[in-house]
Image: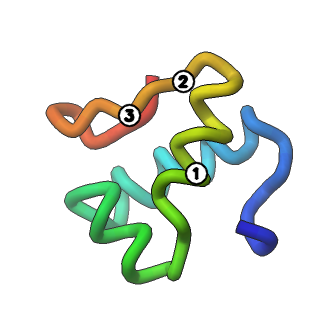
Amino acid sequence: MDNLPQDPFILLSFVNTKLRDDYSSLDEMCNDLDIDRKALEDKLRASGFEYSAENNKFF
């Protein structure tokens, strides 16, 4: 997670852009980019964002 933006709003934008443009699921993105999914979800959840698998994005 060190190579990802640390600001939660920039991180949200980065992750949602990657999901929209390059990946069909959060698992696929995390596996490909070697990101700890739980840590990513925890960081975004702390700022009030939750992942929607149906929409493949964080809200």
The quadrant holding residue 46 is top right
SS for tag 2?
Answer: loop
- Are circles 2 and 3 on residues that touch, CB within 8 Å? yes
Q: Is residue 1 above or below residue 34?
A: above
Q: Amino acid at mark 3?
A: Tyr
Specify the label residue 2 is tagged with. Answer: none
The quadrant holding residue 59 is top left
Q: Is residue 25 left or right of residue 45?
A: left
Residues packed near mark 2 inside 10 Å, few (<14), some (14 to 19) or many (20 plus) = some
Q: Nearer the viewer, residue 27 or 58?
A: 27
Residues packed near mark 1 inside 10 Å, few (<14), some (14 to 19) or many (20 plus) = some
Q: How many labels were placed on the picture?
A: 3
Q: Is residue 12 left or right of residue 3?
A: left
Residues packed near mark 3 inside 10 Å, few (<14), some (14 to 19) or many (20 plus) = some
Residue on which the image places disc 1 = 40
The residue at 21%/60% (across/down) is 24
In percent of width and height, residue 19 lies at: 37, 55
Q: Amino acid at mark 2?
A: Phe
SS for tag 3?
Answer: strand
The residue at 84%/42% (across/down) is 7
Residue on which the image places disc 3 = 51
Q: Is residue 39 left or right of residue 5?
A: left
Q: Earlier in the sequence, mark 2 or mark 1?
A: 1
In percent of width and height, residue 16 lies at: 47, 45
In percent of width and height, residue 57 lies at: 36, 38
